[in-house]
Amino acid sequence: MSDDVKGLIDTLGAMAEMSITLYRSALQAGATTAEAIVILDSFMRAFMGRGKQKEEGGDD
């Protein structure tokens, strides 16, 4: 397996761990499931560099 593929797998694993931690923390702080999903969605978009695409007229 190439170093690039290993790096991608590591990055996706880290994102998955951060995502579940953020989701569970939001629920523990009193957010509803729908609110926690919106928070998680915003995190994922920001993580992937797509946080402002909707504002700029993107096709999201």
Image (cartoon, rainbow, N blue to C red):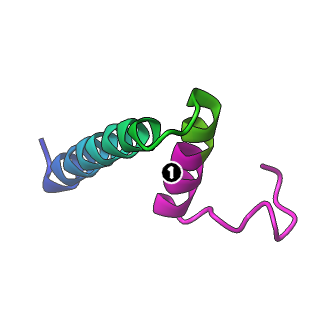
At x 64% / y 31%, what residue is drawn?
Answer: 34
Report the amino acid beneath label 1: Met
32 up-or-down from 25: above or below: above
Q: Position of residue 8 (x, y in %)?
A: 27, 50
How many dots with numbers? 1
- Residue of label 1: 44
At x 46% / y 60%, what residue is drawn?
Answer: 47
**In this view of the protein, which residue sits in the foreground, 22 or 59?**
22
User: Does residue 41 belong to the magenta stretch?
Assistant: yes
Q: Position of residue 60 (x, y in %)?
A: 77, 49
Q: Position of residue 22 (x, y in %)?
A: 38, 46
Span shown in magenta: 39-60
At x 56% / y 48%, what residue is drawn?
Answer: 39
Q: Is residue 50 left or right of residue 58?
A: left
Q: Is residue 1 left or right of residue 18?
A: left
14 up-or-down from 20: above or below: below
Q: Quadrant of residue 29?
A: top left
Furthest-right residue in view?
57
Q: Quadrant of residue 32?
A: top right
In terms of secondary structure, where does tag 1 sit? helix
